[in-house]
């Protein structure tokens, strides 16, 4: 299992618990205008959805299928991130978002670095991938900064209002991760 709490740079990651549904609801509610263009789930934001999210986080952690964290900066809840097992790639996929007032500070990059370290702490994981829509320009920089390689560009139907339907897939293999000094 990965660590329940971890730090990297300015980001602290803390495992989401079912009891934190109100905190999850609040941070999403404050960030809705920022999230709706990119996150399909944001269109159905509700207290019930937040309760289901945090309960699912706990179940998935126990089942060893996904590890989802609250992102903290100086003790304040500023976003969420997670890593999910993907059997078809013998690895894991990372997802993340920040409240708009916390973007541009290196927090997302630090959170992804922390998640990558945790993902590779699991012995059976061979790679980590990040997928994002090409129109989401801020998401380009994070995998590039961390040494991920762009391995695929595919087309499909947009999943959220601001998406163009061009999906970029970035990958970091275990060997490349081990060569880096994180």
Image: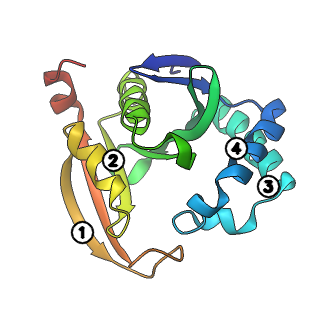
In the rendered image, the vertical position of residue 160 relative to residue 176, given as above or below = below
**How many other residues sit within 10 Å of disc 4, few (<14), some (14-19) or many (≥20)?**
some
Q: Position of residue 149 (x, y in %)?
A: 17, 48
- Residue 7 visible at all: yes
Give the number of the mark in front: 2 or 4. Answer: 4
Q: Residue 69, relative to residue 96: is it above or below?
A: above
Camera-nearest label, 1 or 4: 4
Q: Are marks 2 and 4 in contact (CB under 8 Å)?
A: no
Residue shown at 27%/48% (left/top)? 141
Query: Can the viewer see residue 3 in this picture?
Result: no
The label on residue 27 is 4
How far, Cα to Cα, is label 4 from label 3? 13 Å
The residue that label 3 is drawn on is: 49
Residue 103 appears at what percent x and percent y? 46, 44
User: How far separated are the C-alphas under marks 1 and 4?
Assistant: 32 Å
- Where disc 2 sits, the SS reads strand
- Residue tagged 1: 153
Mark 1 or mark 3: which comes first in sequence? 3
Quarter of the rendering occupied by the C terminus: top left
Left or right of residue 77: residue 155: left
Q: Position of residue 139 (x, y in %)?
A: 35, 54
Secondary structure of residue under mark 3 = helix
């Amino acid at each position: 299992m990965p660590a329940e709490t971890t730090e990297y740079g300015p980001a602290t990651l803390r495992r989401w618990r079912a009891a934190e549904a109100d905190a999850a609801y609040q941070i999403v509610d404050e960030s809705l205008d920022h999230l709706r263009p990119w996150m399909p789930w944001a269109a159905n934001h509700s207290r019930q959805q937040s309760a289901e999210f945090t309960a699912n986080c706990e179940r998935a952690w126990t089942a060893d299928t996904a590890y989802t964290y609250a992102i903290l900066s100086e003790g304040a809840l500023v976003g969420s991130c997670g890593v999910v097992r993907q059997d078809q790639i013998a690895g894991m996929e990372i997802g993340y978002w920040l409240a708009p007032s916390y973007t541009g500070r290196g927090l997302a990059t630090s959170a992804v670095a922390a998640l990558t370290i945790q993902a590779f702490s699991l012995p059976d994981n061979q790679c980590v991938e990040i997928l994002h829509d090409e129109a989401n320009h801020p998401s380009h920089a994070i995998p590039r900064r961390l040494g991920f390689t762009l391995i695929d560009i595919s087309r499909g139907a947009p999943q959220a209002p601001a998406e163009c339907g061009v999906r970029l897939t970035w990958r970091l293999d275990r060997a490349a991760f081990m060569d880096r000094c994180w």
